[in-house]
Image: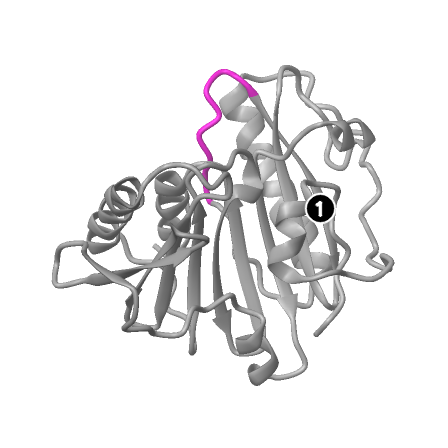
Amino acid sequence: MARISWLAFPAALLLIFGACGQSDVEEPEVSGETHKQGEPSQVKQEVLAEVWEAVVQKSGAEPKLPRDLETGDRYLAAKVAADADGYEVAYYLTDQPVPLNDPELEKEAPYLIAAAIVHDSAKGARAGVSYEPDMKTGQPADLGHGITGYMEAGDGNLRRLVWHEGNWSFSVHRTDGEGTGEEMKAQAKEMAEKLEKQMLPPPQEVGAGTFDISGTGASANSIQWQAETIVYSVHFGKPLELIDIVAKMNE
């Protein structure tokens, strides 16, 4: 698997991709340009444009990045790491404008993370997606629209619910071990309903959505998909909004 430098964020996200080696990714220097003027909406557009330019200049992967993010009355900020092996962009919400790649952002928790990893082959990229094989075991759950999910037990409790739509697998779980199968089923039905209306990027072979309904922060939920030798991913704290964000990237 190709190497990429990961920014500092919760270890739960690292488990998705596996352990990474020591960083050799070249990060753009802080531009020194502070957004001293402008409302949060204006600064947001500037940050999105700066991120896009930084990734285009240095990454070996074509950018697949959010076109817009809901920031309310706060300012959008970002850190970018990019090289021939891919890129990682961590977005933050701040109370004041912050330059791109400002070191102070390392103290903050990311609001959203978008990344791409370039693999040596399409086969390697496919293996880099957390795709769940189709299974017909476990307790069936009717998710509507002709979709049946299966709830898998562990330690005497229902641990996760898995379903498939086209080349995509989706799974809902709780890392805290609490809650019930009905709670997971209700969340999965909401997702299945949204996916009937929203179109995610078409993966070359496989895509995967993994949602921890008990988690918080950007590492709680992820959507990954394969595009030839590249695995793209987006991570966000709210599962239904994550689907919206990734679907808009496909428009």
**Residue sitting at 80 percent across and 36 percent down?**
31
**Residue sitting at 26 percent across and 47 percent down?**
185
Q: Nearer the viewer, residue 185 or 83?
A: 185
For this view, does 155 lie left or right of residue 61? left
Residue type, mark 1 in image? Val
For this view, does 219 lie left or right of residue 108? left
Q: Which portion, as a residue range, is magenta? A: 67-74
Q: Main secondary structure of the magenta part?
A: loop
Secondary structure under tag 1 reads strand
Q: Nearer the viewer, residue 226 or 132?
A: 132
- Residue at the front extreme, as displayed: 156
**Residue sitting at 74 percent across and 45 percent down?**
7
Q: Is residue 151 magenta?
A: no
**Residue sitting at 76 percent across and 27 percent down?**
107
Residue at image mark 1? 80
Q: Nearer the viewer, residue 89 or 172?
A: 172
